[in-house]
Amino acid sequence: MPATEATLTILVDNEAAPPLAAEHGFALWIEAAGRRILFDTGQGGALAGNAGRLGVDLSAADTFVLSHGHYDHGGGIPAVLTLNPDISVFAHPHCLRRRFVVSPKETRAVGLPDEATAALRRHHSVTWLEAPALLEPDVGLTGPVARATAFEDTGGPFFLDRDGRRADPLDDDLALWIRTSRGLVVCVGCAHAGAINTVRQAQARSGSRELLAVIGGFHLGAASAARMAATIAALRELDPRHLVPCHCTGRAASETLRAMLGDRVAPGAAGQTFRF
């Protein structure tokens, strides 16, 4: 039985209690199996200040994991790599792509800032993941997540060009899992591959069916009623003991999850710490 214990602290989120700064983005500090892991950075504006107020020493991080290549998850990469010149980085190579949201209301770039892609290209210790990987025997990365469910999609009008002709599959989207003595903990950035797809892949890769917690963004802000209903039904089947929707889940979707799934749902915010 795994003896790993994990402590997770939300450093950046859309929600925060003063004096912490709120920011549209996500970053998670993870201590597990002797590792100090920074999972995403947010846009970069709130990370250092929030970490300092929470007593988290970012310079002590030995591992950085990028969930996917969007500005609100990797905007702080240059500062992190400057602070930690020997940190081990794990990301999918497609995180470097130029990316856009294209809708009748707007066209805007949403990929990593140029400074972040340049910093990643320069960094001497990057593992470009195109398959699952183990960081430790009880800590791993899903690699690209298989799109198996019929009701999940990337969650928005994402494209690889400004004209909206080439859909962005966001195939760099990955998650981190931790196998603890109490069950599996799954950490997601935005779950563009679908939260249910992601959890199921983490279960398959870890070999752990008992789901202790899922934490991160579920990208349900624009989800249809049908998708919400199917997601809730699947979550009931997966039966996590703790569900911490953050960031792009959206307030309305988080409230729906709590109304339908009860006290196991605790919407996340910067400053929260979880011990598993």
Image (cartoon, rainbow, N blue to C red):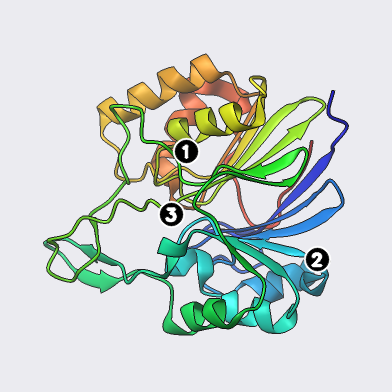
Real-space Cα separation, disc 2 to disc 3, in angstroms: 28 Å
Mark 1, residue position: 254
Location of residue 173 with respect to 80 vertically, above or below: above
Residue at x 37%, y 41% (from the top left corner):
220
Query: Which of the two labelled residues, at mark 2 and mark 3, occupies the earlier sequence position?
Result: 2
Residue at x 48%, y 25% (from the top left corner):
259
Looking at the image, residue 232 sits to the left or right of residue 36; the answer is left
Q: Position of residue 81 (x, y in %)?
A: 66, 78
Mark 1 residue type: Ser
Pointer 3 local density, CA inside 10 Å: few below 14, some 14–19, many at least 20: many
Query: Which of the two labelled residues, at mark 3 and mark 1, occupies the earlier sequence position?
Result: 3
* Disc 3 to disc 1: CB gap under 8 Å: no
Mark 3 lies on a secondary structure that is: loop
Location of residue 56 with respect to 224 vertically, above or below: below
Residue at x 82%, y 70% (from the top left corner):
57
Which residue is more in the foreground, 110 or 174?
Answer: 174
Looking at the image, residue 245 sits to the left or right of residue 37; the answer is left
Identify the disc placed on residue 56. 2
Quadrant location, the N terminus: top right
Mark 2 lies on a secondary structure that is: loop
* Disc 2 to disc 3: CB gap under 8 Å: no
Which residue is more in the foreground, 239 or 94?
Answer: 94
Which residue is more in the foreground, 161 or 28?
Answer: 161
Regarding residue 45, the answer to whether it shows in the image is no
Identify the disc placed on residue 172. 3
Residue at x 78%, y 66% (from the top left corner):
61
